[in-house]
Amino acid sequence: MGRITLDKVAKRFGEVEVIPPLDLTIEDGEFVVFVGPSGCGKSTLLRLIAGLEDVSGGEIRIDGQNATELPPAKRGLAMVFQSYALYPHMSVRKNIAFPLKMAGLSEDEQKKRIDNAAKILNLTDYIDRRPGQLSGGQRQRVAIGRAIVREPAAFLFDEPLSNLDAALRVGMRLEITELHDRLKTTMIYVTHDQVEAMTMADKIVVLRAGHIEQVGTPLELYRAPRNVFVAGFIGSPKMNLIAGAEAGKHGCKTIGIRPEHIAVSPTEGTWKGRVGVSEHLGSDTFFYVHDTGLGEDLTVRVAGEVELHSGDTVYLTPDADKLHRFDDTGLRLA
Amino acid sequence: MRLSRTPKYFGVLDSRILLVVILMLINLPIIIWMLYTYFKEIPVDILEAARMDGASLKNEILYVLTPMAVPGIASTILLNIILAWNEAFWTIILTTVNAAPLTAFIASYSSPEGLFYAKLSAASTMAIAPILIMGWFSQKQLVRGLTFGAVK
């Protein structure tokens, strides 16, 4: 079991309130991703749940039990750190065995659990090596192994893939998702990478300056962002946000249109512009269009390979059904 | 001499225990400063990981902190052996016969009867030898310890 409830949880560092009172429920078995820009308080929130920081107010309940005052080890949670935080003087086996040794488990039970974790994470070949002799991906797997053997109520991941190169990150992302499918344990994952958030999460919590901006499934956030911040944060490339007269035509303060919801034509369309930089990814082409007369440069995503050159004139037509409207306060209009 | 009055009062003048206490007090600041630096270099994440893994403060020190600081502890010990071995000022003032270390022995060749260069040189060379040998075998550890944390 691993149901975690935050009830008016707040954190202050002296006079600075990094997390104003906040409510959140994480259901058992859910994969929840905390996402937000740097300094938004996502790591602090995770550390509050872990017990590595004391809360300034409110209550944290794990499986109905008040865990606010419990030390980290008594909360039944396991954490994977961005820096891996492996014990450099211990072999992989000893690293994984450490929490079991601290829990006073028998040698037989320790061996059984270590072998099981090593098998799940393909650690068997280098179980007797030290962390210094492993690659980044292998180290992160050891860190996950150390978390798995404890059979925790929930896993806490603090930007675990940030130190890995792009290719390895994709691989590890899949491994963590598969691990969640297999273990069905609650996972809380902190990242600033919205691709990780979109691909891994059952539920995304978007944070800004300690406030929860929106909670929802990845597609809910994509389809119906609650405000301008979420609209701009979720989606890659980010949503085009247009204010001014064009937004006025739609009866709102700001309109948002995702790059993939704009049709491109060389002859006719709603907006006219001049192509700046083109990025050819093979599967997609991104255009950055200037001089649109909207006060903003637009990003357009077209499927496949499209040959348009810098300086070419293009006409853009937004998909009316996919247009997002936001009011003066930045909130979404129905 | 004034400096020897207090030890004399306590009856510990020219005793090994006095020498041990004095050398310890002289070297204590550098020991604390060096060890503090090494322990401070240990990433906080690792200590937090140990706490998450259920380690008590005692186990954290025993299984994580101390093993990780071994290079630092080793170089601190080594440096302080060298400093204690070379210390001449207090050892010459506070010892005569019973607790006299090498430095007092070497200094004895510079006496009112004259300066015995040959003997003084021979004794000094002999005195350097153990430190030289020890330093030779542990130079890697010592340099690593002294530059620990200087660069990433």
Image (cartoon, rainbow, N blue to C red):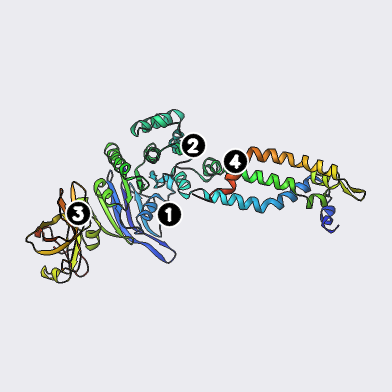
Question: Viewer-nearest of labels 2 and 4?
Answer: 4
Residue B96 percent coordinates (x, y): 86, 47
Amino acid found under the numbered disc labelled 1: Glu
Work out whether disc 1 and disc 4 sit on a shared chain.
no
Give how far apart the Cα atoms at labels 1 and 4 are.
Answer: 39 Å
Image quadrant containing the C terminus of chain A: bottom left
As rendered, which of A46 and B44 lies closer to the eye? B44
Residue on which the image places disc 1 = A53
Q: Residue furthest right?
A: B113
Image quadrant containing the N terminus of chain A: top left
Asked whether disc 2 touches disc 1, contact meaning CB atoms under 8 Å apart, the reply is: no
Give how far apart the Cα atoms at labels 3 and 4 are.
Answer: 54 Å
Give how far apart the Cα atoms at labels 2 and 1 are.
Answer: 27 Å
Residue on which the image places disc 2 = A90
Asked whether disc 1 touches disc 4, contact meaning CB atoms under 8 Å apart, the reply is: no
Query: Which residue is found at the position 11% from the left and 64% from the top?
Result: A271
| SS label for mark 4 | helix
Amino acid found under the numbered disc labelled 3: Phe
Residue on which the image places disc 3 = A286
Compared to residue A148, the image places residue A313 above or below, namely: below
Quarter where residue A36 is shown: bottom left
Label 2 or label 1, whichever comes before in sequence order: 1
* Crowdedness near tag 4: few (<14), some (14–19) or many (≥20) residues, C-alpha within 10 Å: few
Residue on which the image places disc 4 = B140
